[in-house]
Image (cartoon, coloured by chain):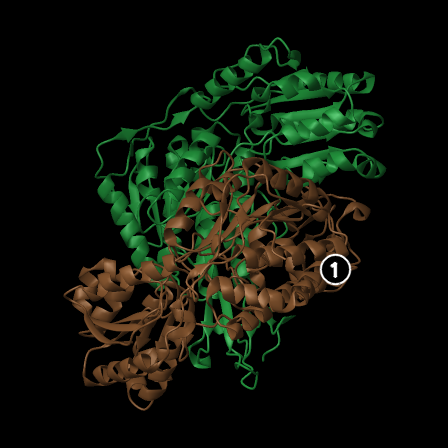
Chain colours: A brown, B green
């Protein structure tokens, strides 16, 4: 029952004049639905409603907000087959992936609910008064985190569930106490509308104020621009291209009142293959990485686009085995003709470079929009001299850099831009032996992995999915894991404030039983 | 023994061609010293050295860095009288203030040392592996905070010690593990040089790498611009004007690689005087606020520039008492003729507005550069219609806004820009009665105070000295208190990493005995 309309809070609305369709990349044709792009009036209405809702929503207890998040997860599940079918149709991704990603999305919502129910995330910090202190008495001072206001979330192309309508950005902002306005991704607007309907149902069922959530359709950039520059919007979450993310970052920081824009953008996720990994474990890693490179047709921000090793027979053998494994795997559909076209363009550009050799590729005919996996090699020297090769090609492609020696390898790492992840394949003594390599890698990434693959991002308190620019616009914050909540809050400090008027988190009794820092010491005891 | 030269690490250097003097506002003449502005070569050298030092410094334990911070405090004390005399001469501030501010500065350094020695600030978070999990095993994931790189700190005009060379920005960045390059404030370059010499001595004594600290002189904007746009600089701390802070923020966010710029800027620090405060406590508050408005000649970012109350006989009486008290206090010297001139300009502009009445002012002759305190009133309606009256006048001036009713008062609060502090004077039942007023105030400020004065910023874990734009460029971070350290760090996540190669903070044994979040629970136990 997809209407193609926008949700302005709980109201469905289609006042705009522009319409668009979504596309089924597997059947290579438009879907049946027509979507109505949000008009300026509808955008302003959604923001205004969010601002109003914020006044009430920010006062709700953690337990009440947790109930809302759990209800969203439940309502998403209740959408059943229709949701899964719409997802696979609009993304070309297989049903197994749809089910897995739905599970992850529900898991994220529930994880934030658990965080709220436990309650210690608000960083409650208390320093009690010392009236007898000389020369000046010390007053009672207490602080905790409070939500910043309406947040705009941009749906991403490659995760129609987990990084879109009810994905990590939305879940973390709602958990923080901020209303959310989603700018739905045009490639899967139908999936987005269904998930939005689940959120609206959950909001009604759990007594949330109207406007705590809105979902706006758009096929161009205008809706996003108007949202990010709206004075009542206080923060932005985005997952996508460097170009798109940087444009939003510039809009957000150049407003009259600058706001934080958390854009998670490109990454080639370098993998350092140390000598020992090329010996006994050669076949293991070749098979693991063939799988990681082609997973989801390579359309992951953590896709390993760059393998770096020391030139020689052992690396040659590994590359050849990896190439064989890679070309045996069945290609799959990419998300959209545009994404496929960009991949083909990027792939041809780099593989036609005379310094680059093609090791292996899938060499049979492919249906339209399918991603043709490819493995390339280049020398360390040529890689260093051609920064264009450092850029991400979004799709199932990986470039192997063959370094002359450890020094060149280290120089290459220093020459790279910021990354989401970096991986070391080797044994424990090598971490010590290649200390400079490991240190150089660590300085460039948000997550450093030993003997594993970068794809597959665990949702847990210790996860950090972020990294130095241009992996993200702010290396201090994660978009995956429960720490993502702190993007949408700021501290407020209460000085000399009466007990009865303090938020529960800061009262002497500690009625919520949370962990607090009291006079310099962590404790969950009352004062 | 002030040389007027720059410190490039431990080397004194004066290659630049531009020189300048500092000024003694009390004797109204230049000091005897000549300062050499840092040249482009010297700036680049300082940054390069900082980057090199970072490779070593970032590896140091908390205890080792704490030793450095404590040594700085000690060396500052060792400078003795010469430092205090230079401070009073270059600032016009009295000796008592110099001693107090020196104590606070040493206290800040020692507070960060204590934080490092305790060690839990790194936010160590651990989720152990679940190899038996289906369908995919869970890998071991651990994260902690690591320093981001060389930081540029701008000395502020109004705190030659506590917000300058070895002030809160420097102390927090060094504590985080980041080398610091100070752009010394030109009004107190001699004080800055002395403090820099203490830091350099402490660095040598405690085995810190050369370049962990540099101090650069400058009288214009070029040195600061070159520093903030240098690719190897990774963050900026600034305390000063909205114009200056915004310019630096724009430079920092528009670089090829954007960096965080923490600028603490203007604030009028609204004080809401609720009816009960005008009754019994009228004389008490009049005397407290006369002191707060004129403290340090009003040259504090937390100076109460705006008092807001409900029109009527009671408010009139309070204003008249406050005016009397205010005009009885002895004025004092402002920091510099430029600051005095700006104050006079701002004061005349607002007091000559026909909607504004002058209640009281110090009406005797004053020596050059002394700040003439003044109390003004305006109606709520006129204040709402003239946003120019919402701006800070830096100096001992306060404007009383007389509101027609509670609704107008609330509207006024909503019309204000972001503020460092907001204060409520009243009794406990009034906080409930005026809930909307309190809520509106809370949404605009970083610190909300009950029955006290905003001046006097306690240095402790619960302090938050920051606030929504334009009070600062980022409402999520404080520049005072030990939480200031988190401005200079980012998380790094270790996945599947061998125990022996993990930082001490993340090892199973918990050798540092710090508080950690392990599998979702806070604990200082080993795993």
Residue B104 locus on image (x, y percent) = 55, 44
Q: Is residue A40 left or right of residue B450?
A: left
Q: Nearer the viewer, residue B485 or A474?
A: A474
Residue B433 locus on image (x, y percent) = 83, 35
Q: Quadrant of the C terminus of chain A?
A: bottom right
User: In the rendered image of this protein, does residue A119 appear above or below residue B397?
Assistant: below
Give me the residue at 68% from left, 21% from top: B400
Q: Quadrant of the N terminus of chain A?
A: bottom right
Q: Nearer the viewer, residue A469 or B180?
A: A469
Q: Which residue is mark 1?
A: A63
Element type at mark 1: helix
Give me the residue at 34% from left, 38% from top: B224
Within 10 Å of disc 1 (Cα), the crowding (few <14, some 14-19, many 20+) is some
Q: Is residue A142 left or right of residue A463?
A: right
The answer to whether residue A217 is seen in the rendering is yes
Residue B382 locus on image (x, y percent) = 66, 16
Q: Residue furthest left?
A: A354
Q: Residue furthest bottom?
A: A280
Give me the residue at 43% from left, 71% from top: A296
The answer to whether residue B327 is seen in the rendering is no
| Quadrant assignment, res B165 | top left
Q: Nearer the viewer, residue A468 or B343?
A: A468
Q: Is residue B75 left or right of residue B298?
A: left
- Mark 1 chain: A
Q: Is residue A17 left or right of residue A301?
A: right
Q: Nearer the viewer, residue B104 or A425?
A: A425
């Amino acid at each position: 029952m997809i209407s193609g309309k926008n949700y302005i809070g709980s109201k469905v609305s289609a006042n705009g004049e522009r319409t668009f369709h979504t596309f089924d990349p597997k059947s290579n044709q438009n879907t049946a639905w027509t979507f109505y792009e949000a008009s300026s009036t509808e955008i302003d209405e959604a923001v205004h409603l969010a601002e109003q809702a914020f006044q009430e929503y920010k006062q709700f207890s953690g337990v009440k907000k947790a109930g809302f998040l759990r209800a969203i997860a439940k309502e998403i599940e209740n959408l059943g087959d229709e949701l899964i079918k719409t997802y696979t149709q609009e993304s070309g991704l297989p049903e197994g992936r749809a089910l897995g990603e739905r599970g992850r999305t529900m898991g994220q919502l529930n994880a934030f609910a658990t965080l709220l129910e436990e309650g210690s995330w608000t960083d409650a910090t208390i320093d009690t008064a010392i009236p007898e202190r000389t020369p000046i008495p010390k007053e009672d001072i207490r602080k905790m985190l409070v939500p910043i206001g309406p947040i705009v979330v941009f749906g991403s192309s490659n995760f129609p569930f987990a990084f879109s309508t009810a994905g990590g950005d939305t879940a973390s902002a709602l958990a923080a106490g901020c209303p959310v306005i989603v700018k739905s991704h045009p490639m899967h607007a139908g999936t987005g509308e269904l998930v939005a309907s689940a959120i609206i149902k959950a909001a009604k069922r759990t007594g949330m104020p109207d406007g705590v959530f809105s979902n706006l359709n758009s096929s161009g950039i205008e809706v996003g621009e108007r949202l990010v520059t709206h004075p009542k919007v206080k923060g932005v979450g985005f997952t996508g291209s460097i170009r798109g993310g940087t444009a939003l970052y510039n809009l957000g920081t150049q407003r009259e009142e600058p706001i934080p824009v958390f854009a998670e953008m490109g990454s080639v996720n370098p993998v350092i293959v140390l000598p020992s990994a090329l010996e006994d474990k050669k076949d293991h890693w070749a098979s693991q990485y063939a799988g990681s490179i082609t997973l989801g047709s390579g359309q992951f921000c953590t896709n390993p686009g760059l393998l770096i090793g020391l030139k020689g027979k052992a690396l040659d053998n590994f590359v050849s085995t990896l190439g064989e494994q890679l070309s045996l795997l069945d290609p799959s559909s990419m998300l959209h003709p545009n994404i496929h076209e960009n991949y083909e363009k990027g792939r041809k550009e780099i593989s036609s470079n005379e310094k680059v050799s093609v090791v292996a590729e899938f060499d049979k005919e492919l249906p339209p929009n399918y991603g043709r996996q490819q493995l390339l090699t280049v020398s360390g020297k040529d890689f260093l001299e051609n920064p264009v090769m450092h850029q991400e090609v979004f799709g199932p492609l990986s470039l192997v850099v063959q370094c002359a020696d450890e020094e060149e390898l280290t120089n290459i790492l220093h020459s790279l831009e910021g990354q989401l992840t970096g991986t070391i394949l080797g044994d424990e003594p090598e971490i010590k032996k290649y200390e400079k390599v490991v240190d150089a890698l660590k300085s460039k990434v948000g997550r450093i992995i030993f003997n594993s693959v970068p794809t597959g991002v665990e949702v847990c308190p210790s996860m950090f999915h972020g990294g130095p620019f241009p992996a993200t616009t702010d290396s201090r914050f994660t978009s995956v894991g429960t720490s993502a909540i702190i993007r949408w809050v700021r501290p407020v400090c209460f000085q000399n404030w009466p007990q009865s008027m303090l938020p529960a988190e800061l009262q002497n009794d500690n009625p919520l039983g949370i962990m607090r820092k009291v006079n310099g010491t962590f404790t969950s005891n009352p004062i």
